[in-house]
Amino acid sequence: MRIGLFLDNLDEEYQISVYKGIRAEAAALALDLICIQGETLLNYREDSGGKPFPSLEFLSADGILILTSVIGTRTASAPMTALRRVFNIPVVSIGNRLLDYPSIVVKNKESMTLLMEHLIEFHGYRKLLYLGGPAQHPDNLSREHIFRRTINSLGKKFPGLEGKVMNGEFHQTSAMMMLREYMDANPNAPPEVIVAASDNIALGALELLRVRQEPLWSDCPVTGFDDIDQASREIPALTTIRQPLEEMGKLAVKTLWDLMQCKETSQIIHVESELKIRNSCGCKVQWKSRDDANVPDHTDGGTANRSEYNMQNVSLLGQALITVNSPEEMLSPLRFFLTNLAVKTFYLILYPTPLEQIGKKGNLIYQKTGNKEFFTADHPVTVDMTDFFSNTIIIKAVTERTVTHPAIPNPAEFSEPHSWCVYYLRSSKEYLGLIVYEAPDRVHPQMCNAAIFLANTVKRLQIYGDEKEQSLRLEQEVALRTKDLTETYQKLREEVARRTAVEAEVLRISEMERLRFSMDLHDDICQRLAGISMFCKSLINSVSSHSFLPELFDLIDETLIRTRRYAHDSFPMELDALGLKEALSALCHTVTKQSSCGINTGGIHASGKNAGGKNAGGQNACRCVFSWSGPEKSPFSPAHDLNIYRIVQEALQNAVKHAAANQIQVTVHSGRKIFTVTVSDNGVGIPRPNEEEPGPAEMTRYIKGGGLGLRSMRYRAHQLGAEYIFESSEQEGTRVEIRISLKNG
């Protein structure tokens, strides 16, 4: 028998933990499991002509599990009529109440109340700020209700008790935007504690407090909800409420099994949550102990090494896929990636043309089952999705088991259950295809990352394929219509505009990949380094004979700082949360701080050349001054803001790294028609090739300075439609300036 599971993505701990419980219990009951990622009820409308969970048409499942806490409706009754029409098999909801269906729901009333009483009665906080998820989301509704009710019930006992509520989304960027709005409105009146509706919101709030560096706000306590892995790794460790995620998954499968056996089940099955007191609320507890089963064991170097190894394989796959120019060239890096991550079963199916709905047929491009694999990009095999899920993967699994257990008379009847995961390859609203795989639990986030890389590569190849065909057609038309110059000229202008759009799309895809790399670096490697640092610090006081521990602790902290800097430079999160002005100000402040402290991060370091009054000791103190005149908010789109930020970032890097400057001026001026950004320094400029007989050192600086960095700035200025000015000399330093017409912003 087979059951299906619908969730968002197996790229974060909440969903992975629930999936682990589901997979373990399904295996215990000898049930095959297919996990569908990415299908949601949030954007479904009954008048759109589509159906909720379209994969149901070809899954051939005997029962369905829905992780409604991540893909459910924001209102309790939105698509219920459609669901009743779609589901003619047993269904169990996990996380939220789904009307007419058994639901596994966490009881958080008592734990949330205990948290509020702990903050108010134990710590004595009187001014509380609640940062919540969507206002009508069921999870947020229950947590916000307890927050408000506790404030009201204890208000008479504790005069001056008050609570402020803000709503956004359950992710870090939304939390930063909410808290930024509150800080701007109340700069001198911080709350005494921030109560977040999820750990991701809490982590976003902590990140903004670190970025803003406001003295009145720097020590503001923060609490979360969910107890994801990063909560225990954060510094300070996050006070939160733990949900028994794996137990929820197991209980959901047991309930679904009872339904499939026509047994009576309760409509609501509750599981208990648990308050976890750590440091972020203001407590000075020794939370990291062996008795706390939720605290990861940082001494397990094998787990850390495996995760780092998996991350490296994802990075290598992404780097390789960026360079491929045809579907056939994807084979080698994909095979290498799957082998290194011990992925036993993998299918890549692409739709002939991008679809806005999930396709019922596709072209099988690549398949791997056991030690056998086939790549058929030249002659793809068209497969029907119903037949594929009903027969193909079952036949492959049975064949594999027959080889393993040849004595079994009917391997389909006596075989071990399998767990397949499905991830749809998408670009914006277009469905490009899907992957189906069977992989170890520890590599699910990497498989999601790989799917994103594959989707970006497929889309890029489609764009370039269309570009090639379009160019060929255009050449044929030009050859046939050379006499009609006006029409030919117009078509060429359209082609130039289209090429510019293609370049912008390629740049967007590159930034997406940099964002994914930055998030993975910050959320995984940084947190592991923080845990190792805390472990070493604890050994300093307990193991006096190891004199090397202080140096090791300092080295780990320096590595953590550099890694966070790399993650930040890969994609500046504050640009989305705070805007262009504050992002540029923070960038200049960072350059000044790092150069004065001798920190070499993000590729920005002193050249060590004793020129222009620089320190010959190898590190130069550089003062970077920022000024902004004009409206507080950038007049451009987020994509334009990102290009402006990257140009300034590259210019600053060149000034510090190559020019050995000790003074840099970043000026932004917005007039009525022109928006001007200027970066000037007093360093050693780039010699021009027409100068009289430049020496080897000058030629080296010219080659480096005129290489990828300058081409990148020119390319981004072109994308902005800006006038790009670059002036440099050895005596007067370097000036980079872009001028953007506001009518194009």
Image: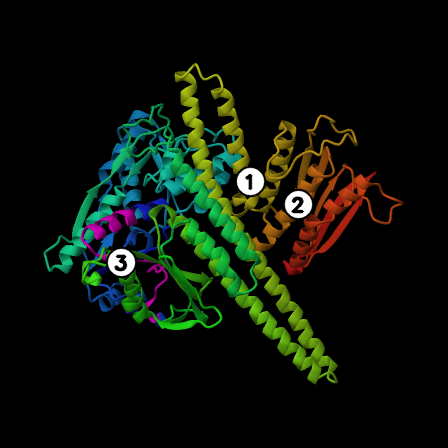
Query: Mark 3 belongs to which amino acid?
Result: Arg
According to the picture, the residue beneath numbered tag 3 turns out to be 401
Query: Mark 1 belongs to which amino acid?
Result: Tyr
- Give x and y (percent) for residue 73: 31, 57
**Residue 658 highlighted magenta (yes or no):** no
User: Is residue 56 in view?
Assistant: no
Q: Is residue 373 above or below residue 310?
A: below
Closer to the camera, 166 or 244?
244
The alpha-carbon separation of the residues under discs 3 and 2 comes to: 55 Å
According to the picture, the residue beneath numbered tag 2 turns out to be 650
Other residues around mark 2 within 10 Å, as few (<14) / some (14–19) / many (≥20) = some
The alpha-carbon separation of the residues under discs 3 and 1 comes to: 46 Å
**Residue 23 highlighted magenta (yes or no):** yes
Q: Is residue 342 above or below residue 224?
A: below
Query: Mark 2 belongs to which amino acid?
Result: Glu
Q: Is residue 432 left or right of residue 648?
A: left
- Give x and y (percent) for residue 694: 85, 43
Q: Is residue 445 left or right of residue 31?
A: right
Which residue does the image show at 24% across and 48% down from the upper left? Answer: 24
Q: Give the secondary structure at mark 2.
A: helix
Q: Give the secondary structure at mark 3.
A: helix
Other residues around mark 1 within 10 Å, as few (<14) / some (14–19) / many (≥20) = some
Number of numbered labels in the structure image = 3
- Give x and y (percent) for residue 148: 30, 40
Which of the 4 quarters of the picture holds residue 257?
bottom left
Between disc 3 and disc 2, the foreground one is 3
The alpha-carbon separation of the residues under discs 1 and 2 comes to: 14 Å
Between disc 3 and disc 1, the foreground one is 3
Other residues around mark 3 within 10 Å, as few (<14) / some (14–19) / many (≥20) = some
Q: Is residue 526 left or right of residue 733?
A: left
- What span is colored magenta in the figure? 18-47
